[in-house]
Image: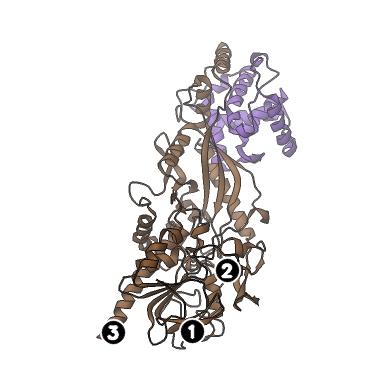
Amino acid sequence: MDKWPRLDRRKFLVLISALGVTLGAGGVATGVLVFSGGNPLLQGFRLDPDALRHIAEKYFASHPAEKSADFLERELLAAVAASGAGKSLVDAIAAAVRRDFTAGNTVVLDGWILSRTELRLWVLQTLK
Amino acid sequence: MIASAATTRGRPDQPFDVCVVGSGPAGITVARSLPKSLSIALVEAGGFDYEADSQKSYEGDTVGLPPDYLSTTRSRLFGGSSFCWGGVCRPLDAYDLERKDWLPASVAWPFGREELLPYYDRASTLLGLQSFFSDGRDRRALTRDGAHSEGLVLVPFQHSDPTMRFGTEFRDELVRAENITLFLHANAIAFDSEPGGNVRALAVIEKARQRSTISARFFVLATGGIENARILLNSTSAHPAGLGNRHDQLGRYFMSHTPIWGAGQIVFADSPARDIEGRLRATKGRICLSLDDDIKRRERLLNLGLALQYGRRQRLYRGERQVARLREQLLKLGIGLNLGSGDGGNNNFVERAVAGFAKNTGQGEAALFSFFALPEAVPDLDNRVTLSSRNDDYGIRRVSVRFRTTELEAQNLERSLALIANRLGGQALGRVRIEFNAHDPATRIADQHHMGTTRMHDDPRRGVVDRDCIVHGTRNLYVAGSSVFPSAGFVNPTFTIIALAHRIADHLARSARQRSGALHG
């Protein structure tokens, strides 16, 4: 059963924040532990907003047209939907990330070769 | 025994059976592997110890290389460049021996890897290594929870531990050997050969500037990837361009590896990290991550190894308390992180990380490895050793060496790295960080691996020695060492040098028997 379409926007944001923490592991060398600072549900986690800002600045500098929460949410939902049939949301996002790599849909940021989906998940949080 | 070049033995009326020129890993291996019934002259330009005066003969002109490159990347003493060897061992892969038709100067080795396997095993025995070809010690796929990944292999190396210094290890044995006469401080000038292809003698000049010749029935030139070309270029008695150089091949295709230190980092998910750590523990050498051969053939890629340096287990996550709170908050919203189900279950990178975050047990700890990159060395017609206009202190012409890497190599390297990164990410195995610019020539500095200048090819228009490592146009002059490599992969050459030296010794022993039989029959 598809779980992701039933998420409302608030739940989705909380979830991507959680996934952002996880996906930040890929950026360990830059100390990336991401945090949706504006979301009260996640306050007190004391993650690293500086790292997240750093990533967002770099990403938006090279992709200025994507500096829009609506755009990013739309793209992310589309990516997840494309990978999500029969999967939990977490699995669907993980599948979208894997698919990015398989398709070469990657972005180089601080030398890290990262999936576009995972980067969008991170940087979206700075716009919220 | 140790002798002066002006000894009785070695004169034209009493030639040695074999004259081995050079006492590095190649020369010493040949000398030790030949039958004891053969009289052998072992000729070394240096002494038992390092001498600055002798080392100076290595100086020369460089283009695209540091000015002191020629005198600092090799050792002119008994034992040769084993004194600047790191002891890292690995056979060439089958892919390394193939012709790459998209690479202008590429030629195949005249034989396949299977021809080398028994000699690689003899090299392993000599160096005290385990065979690379038993018990799965050769390359194999990177795994995740026991399942093979697609397209990625781990390539194990071994280490000669302690690194074998041939001059130290075999000095007493060779000095005592009744069939071996050791000539120290005997600088090879040139071979004297007949137009018909028979090499008669080696001209040498000793430390006291006394010139003499050493006659033999067979010669083995084993003075290193640059000096081999130098001595052949200086050997103009039969051909003005040098021995084996009728088709202007001698000295060309000079190759050197260009390792890129501090090239980047890889965060591996838990399972592949454990696989790598296990392999690193099992071998005392290094482990390289590489693409499998099918991908390299299909994508027209040069070989590339990413040498993984001991993984640092990193606490990549903030800890159990924070995760527990996160899970609690999410559950209140009706969102359950489905950690144990879905495709890949608990095993993919993202889920592993979440699980590790939640449990903080270590199971989910990703691991950070740094790596240095080992790109394949590439033959290039214009990278070459020629004679300089300057002479050394013995009046022997020095060399000039030109070396460059190309944009094709840089682009190829980038493509390989991207494919490795995509294979890792696409299978939830990890992420790659690249910390160098492949297009910056400053990142591609030649190391001490000198190869290709007398390359092996059955056609004298494409190479200098034939498949048996005999110089084209001669009948009794072998070349040993990495100068005969038509291609070089990314592995350190000494192990293959030693394997080929065993092969040359076998061939020479057979030829000596046949000639002996012909003379006496």
Dot 1 falls on which chain? B
Location of residue A107 in the rendering, given as x and y in whole percent from the top left corner: 64, 40
Mark toward the viewer: 2 or 3: 2
In the visual, does B181 lie left or right of A105? Answer: left
The hue of chain B in the figure is brown
In the visual, does B505 lie left or right of B263? Answer: left
Q: Which mark is residue B54?
A: 2
Dot 2 falls on which chain? B
- Res B362 visible: yes
To which residue does mark 3 refer? Answer: B518
Kindly state the secondary structure of the residue where label 1 is placed.
strand
Which numbered disc, 3 or 1, marks the residue that appears first in the sequence? 1
Locate the C terminus of chain A by quadrant.
top right
Q: Are marks 2 and 3 in contact (CB under 8 Å)?
A: no
Kindly state the secondary structure of the residue where label 2 is placed.
helix
Residue ID at (40%, 61%)? B170
Mark 3 closeness class: few <14, some 14–19, many ≥20 residues within 10 Å: few
Residue ID at (45%, 48%)? B155
To which residue does mark 1 refer? Answer: B192
Q: Are marks 3 and 1 in contact (CB under 8 Å)?
A: no
Give the number of marks: 3
Residue ID at (61%, 74%)? B398
B500 in relation to B162, above or below:
below
Which numbered disc, 2 or 3, marks the residue that appears first in the sequence? 2
Badges 3 and 1, same chain = yes
**Chain painted purple:** A
Location of residue B91 in the rendering, given as x and y in whole percent from the top left corner: 42, 56
Mark toward the viewer: 3 or 1: 1
Taking the view exactly as shown, the residue that stands out farthest to the left is: B521
Kindly state the secondary structure of the residue where label 3 is placed.
helix
Residue A113's quadrant in the figure?
Answer: top right
